[in-house]
Image (cartoon, rainbow, N blue to C red):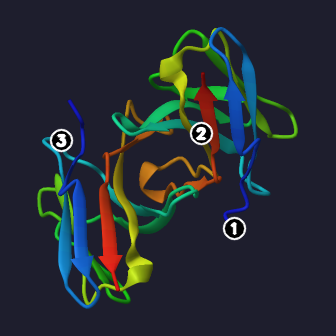
Amino acid sequence: TQLLEQSPQFLSIQEGENLTVYCNSSSVFSSLQWYRQEPGEGPVLLVTVVTGGEVKKLKRLTFQFGDARKDSSLHITAAQPGDTGLYLCAGPKGSGGSNYKLTFGKGTLLTVNP
Amino acid sequence: DSGVTQTPKHLITATGQRVTLRCSPRSGDLSVYWYQQSLDQGLQFLIQYYNGEERAKGNILERFSAQQFPDLHSELNLSSLELGDSALYFCASSVVRGMPTNEKLFFGSGTQLSVL
């Protein structure tokens, strides 16, 4: 069972469209992070959300942390081909202090066609 | 460029063999993480080292081992390789400030391992 479930698994859209991808869990997280991974590269951190209900904006990307801190969403406005990539959510799970593991969802593979 | 260097970028080997993957963290980062990425399992945490000491362990097989050296570079050793070990192996580094919410991981470009 995946601790963090991401949906949809695949998404193919046209340039200029809006989209939302989701990251859900039955567990509470102290924070959630979103990464983007491009082909042949490692994931790159986009944002960390910490407070329940928090909304963060990064240009055309809007990230929201659920009130109960069990889920998060990423909304992209007017998608561009440069937004193409694998979007991963991640959250820390562990036994306290620094002894934790950053656990990743399987990701949403986004393709934006010109 | 994340500042994390992984070598080699590609590795092709045969079943039963042993390989070593190398990672140099960002300057100043004390913590190194190893992850395995495959299509069916996604990005799976293997192991973390902090300043030379093992800090956390994930789904790492007994055939796999890692270490972090005094100069903070790390190596992941994979032995008795099986076909199912074919995957992308990522190293990441961070400063580790002690609080998960402050943690920011910087990933290398990965090593693509193909076991034939």
Q: Which mark is residue A5?
A: none
Q: Locate the N terminus of chain A by quadrant.
A: top left
Subunit under mark 3: A
Mark toward the viewer: 1 or 2: 1
- Image position, residue A13 (x, y; %): 23, 76
Amino acid beneath label 3: Ser
Q: Is residue B62 above or below residue B24?
A: above
Subunit under mark 1: B
Q: Residue at x 69, y 67 (%)?
A: B1
Dot 2: element: strand
Mark toward the viewer: 1 or 3: 1
Amino acid beneath label 2: Tyr
Location of mark 2 (residue): B33
Q: Is residue B76 above or below residue B14?
A: below
Amino acid beneath label 1: Asp
Per the model, the C-alpha gap separating discs 1 and 2 is: 18 Å
Could you tell whether A91 is left or right of A20 in the image? right
First along the sequence among labels 1 and 2: 1
Location of mark 1 (residue): B1
Dot 3: element: loop
Quarter-of-image position of residue B78: top right
Mark toward the viewer: 2 or 3: 2
Q: Locate the C terminus of chain A by quadrant.
A: bottom left
Quarter-of-image position of residue B81: top right
Q: Nearer the viewer, residue B44 or B71?
A: B44
Location of mark 3 (residue): A27
Subunit under mark 2: B
The local crowd at label 1, few if under 14, some if 14 to 19, many if 20 or more residues have their Cα within 10 Å, is few
The local crowd at label 2, few if under 14, some if 14 to 19, many if 20 or more residues have their Cα within 10 Å, is many
